[in-house]
Image (cartoon, rainbow, N blue to C red):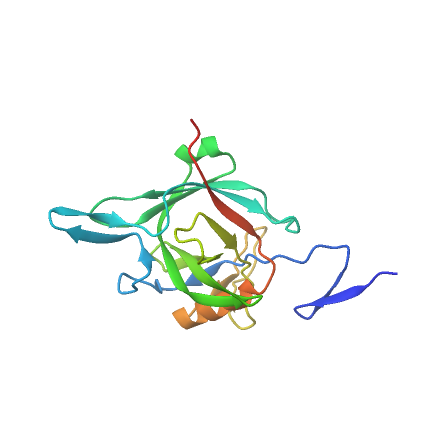
Amino acid sequence: MAVAMLTLGKPCWADEPPEMFADMLHADVPLYTFEWENMWPRSFTSGDDFGCLSAIRFGDWQFTPASDNPNEDARWERFSNYGVIHCAAIFRTADDRKELENAEWRYGYFVKIGTGRRDEHIWDLWAIQSGTRPGSEYRLLAHDPEETTPSAFRVLQQRCPTGWYREGKRFDIWPTRYCVVHSRADLLTLARRMLALPARGTLTLVAKSD
C-alpha cells in the first residue's frame, strides 16, 4: 500500500523524489554594495600594495545535483577576478569544463547574508549577486562555518513565496515569471526557509588538473 507524505502542503508519494524549486530571484536594484562588510571581492590597500581580496576562492567549481533532483544536470562554473582596482567576480557556466573558457559571463559578488539553523547546526548563508542594471539576480547557498575558507556549498532551493511573483502574459515557450525580492531582510528570511528543505545539490571547488 502506498504511503502518502505531506511536503510544504502538497502530497507526494514515498517512491517519488520531492519537487525541487529554482525560481529566478530578482531585485530591481542591487541589495548589497560595498557598505556591506561581507561582500566579496572587495578592494584593499596596505602600504604600497593594493588590489582585490575575496573570501571565496577563484577557480573551477562543479555543481553536482542531489540524487533526488531530476531537474538539473551536473555543470561547471568558473569564478575569476575582474581586476585590481575595480573589484568584481566574473561568473561563467558550462556543461563541460573545457567550454568554460569561451562561456558567456556576468559580473557579480559573493555575499554572506547571515546565518541559519538546520538540524541544530548553524550554517552560514550566502548569495551570489549577479548583475547591476536593471537590478540583480540572486542564487542561494549555504556553507558549514567549521570550514574556514569555503570549498563546498549546499545549493539551496529557491521557492518563491506567494505574493512575490511578477509575471507578464505568456507567449509561446518564453517564460515571463520571476520572484521579486524587495529587501535584504526578505532575502535572508527566504534563505533560512530554503535551508530547511532538501538541497538542490552541492557546489565544490575542483583543483586544477596537471
Residue at horizontal 30%, vertical 52%?
A: 41
Residue pictured at 61% horizontal, 49% vertical: 66
User: Quick check: 50 left or right of 110?
Assistant: left
Q: 116 or 79: nearer the eye? A: 116
Side of 9 where 39 appears, left or right: left
Direction from residue 7 to residue 205 in the image, left or right: left
| Residue closest to the eye, 131 or 126 | 126
Viewer can see residue 134: yes
Is residue 183 among what the camera can see? no
Q: Residue at x 57, y 58 (%)?
A: 170
Residue 154 placed where, x, y %?
Answer: 52, 54
The quarter of the picture where the N terminus appears is: bottom right
Residue found at the very far right of the displayed protein: 1
> Outermost residue, left direction?
48
Q: Is residue 106 above or below residue 193?
A: above
Q: Relative to the observer, which residue lies in front, 187 or 198?
A: 198
Along the line of sight, which residue is nearer the eye, 204 or 99?
204
Left or right: 161, with 131 as reference point = right
> Is the residue 75 above or below the residue 157 in the image?
above
Picture coordinates of residue 16, whole percent (x, y): 74, 55
Residue 69 pos. (x, y %): 63, 51
Residue 73: horizontal and vertical position, in percent?
59, 43
| Residue 184 placement: quadrant | bottom left
In this view, the residue farthest toward the top is 210
Residue at coordinates 11% horizontally, 47% vertically from top-left?
A: 48
